[in-house]
Image (cartoon, rainbow, N blue to C red):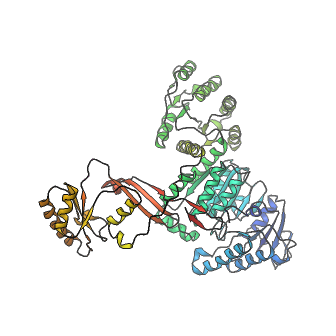
Amino acid sequence: MRPGEGLDALMSPRSIAIIGASQEATKIGGRPVDLLRRHGYAGRIYPVNPKAATVQGLQAYASVADLPEAPDLAIVAVDAERASEAVEQCAARGVRSVVVFSSGFAELGEQGHAMQERLRLAARRTGMRVLGPNCLGAVSVAENSIATFSIVLEHSMPAAGSLGIVSQSGNLGSYTMRLASERGIGVSRFITTGNECDIDIADGIAWLARDPATKVILCCLEACRDAGRLISALEEARDAGKPVIAMKIGTSAAGQAAAASHTGAMAGSDAVFDALFARCGAVRVRSIDELIDLGHAASILLPDRLPKGPDIAILTASGGFGVLIADAAQAVGLSLPELGEETQRKILELVPFASARNPVDATAQMSSRPDLLEKIMSAVVADERADAVILPLPFSLHLTRLRSIYMDSLRNVRAQFPHRPIILCVDGPEDALSELHALGFPTVESFDGCCATVAALVRLQAVSKGPQDVPPAIERPRPLVADAFRHELGAKRALADAGVPVLAEHLVQDVDAAALAATEIGYPVVLKIASPDLPHKTEAGGVVVGVGSEAEVRRTYAQMLDRVATRAPHAAIDGVIVAPMVKGVAELILGSRIDPVFGPVVMVGLGGIFAEILQDSAVQIAAGQRDTGHGDAEIA
């Protein structure tokens, strides 16, 4: 099934059944009933509880089979042992989608995995889509469709907006929604996938990519079960102009182990995820604050106000603030070009003692004289040497007089320059921030966060220009027998067969053959031990460079074998490799492996003694994976 198909009933249901519905609004089975009623869901609500005639004032039903219709969505809020049967009953009744809150499935081992497999098979057999198990459900804000027990909705719904949230972790996604709501940022949809017996993170991304209410997709990712589906979904979002901002957690060994136990999936290599995001146009962030800040800014500035490059201008009433932001900007790769002569002239005419180069320190005169503020702002914003403008306004919105001054000036500047990206570093009352957002100004509280957001917006602009270069499909090399890879010559022969130039080297088993090979190659040469047991030959004394004559070859050959026998007595020795001595080029490390999630990946970086010291390398997926449309990934 293509990612995202069949989720309309989950996200826009006309009727919802709650299996395990409780009279008590504080219980997991009672919360969806309470929230749906309290927040004004307009569809039909069917509590299912065989022990009650009514639940929270609504008529209850003994089973799904007794319902007056097959609901679009059923919420399963019973224990794991009964959840599998409930899902199968929903499938038999013709329910189109199910959310399973219950935990105790694949995250607990083989028995739980077998119960989870029943859920998956019910979905596959009937086409019914299943979210979960072990999930926090889904919410469609504008429709007040609530299939969650999250406490985030305890007092109010988030404002309806354009940020879509999809998360494997329920609490992480719920916390993201809460932060967005607290900052006055509107949310369109909320989906948490949990153990992903059927609906996975790729389904959520792909469906949000097609959702008219969603403009930006925030993704909280722990692991990937199907690389082809994830790639397909990310590319669909990119091609639809819906940026995916991804927070991939589980970067440490401990974090990956925790992710596996949490969701029952392999986390995969973190470096490969970086390569995947870069290739598919997603932008990775490292914290929830970055996720919210960037998502909020992107939702305001898209589609035509993203910074076109990394050059920024800073306008401040404090020289100290300007220095702090300049430091933070440089740390994330932004630059501060000197503003044009005309811009500087205008600023100095208004405030002769200002610093007008960049950062612009217009001093406290900027805030105390409203007649100057708008003129200075306009001069800086008009200078196209800067791709974006950062304006720090600490404390300003908390003071009634300053709030009025800045609001008026910002409103007029926005009218003058509707397409220029201006990011405000400010906190303040919720109504003030909402007004700024409506005017088209993203707001970020901290200096560091503001600069990180602008740097990420620059990356978004780069990927929004179109699909990134994708490696072409590769022709697989002919199979090689395992013995061919006992040492480095086998790998080099495979590279040569694929068209990669390699040095002419000889494997020899005695000293006479070594001397003959060296004469054929030409002096100086390198002698290296050939052994499947010695990946680091130098440590065992198995490499000698710059051998300059036949006599030296014979002497070095014998000495090297003696050293290796002493230092690695149990190593199998296949012989000695005689290679040309090459100087004057940089050393490169090149490696490949089969990633458990994404398949063949290639690493290239600075080699020699610096490979592990500097760890300067890059990773790329070796061949394109695509979703077949049948739930199976294929490698091109």
Q: Is residue 292 magenta?
A: no
Q: Is residue 470 left or right of residue 429?
A: left
Query: Can you tell which quarter of the image residue 502 is in?
Result: bottom left
Q: Quadrant of the N terminus?
A: bottom right
Q: Residue furthest left?
A: 551
Q: Is residue 215 left or right of residue 319?
A: right
**Is residue 459 depicted above or below 363 in this figure?**
below
Q: Quadrant of the C terminus?
A: bottom right
How many marks are shown on the rendered structure?
0
Q: Residue at x 74, y 77 (%)?
A: 88
Residue 538: % across, % down? 25, 62
Query: Can you tell which quarter of the image residue 316 is in?
Result: top right
Residue range (magenta) = 581-585
Query: Can you tell which quarter of the image residue 500 is in?
Result: bottom left
Residue 348: % across, % down? 54, 20
Q: Residue at x 71, y 72 (%)?
A: 123
**Is residue 283 depicted above or below 566 in this figure?**
above
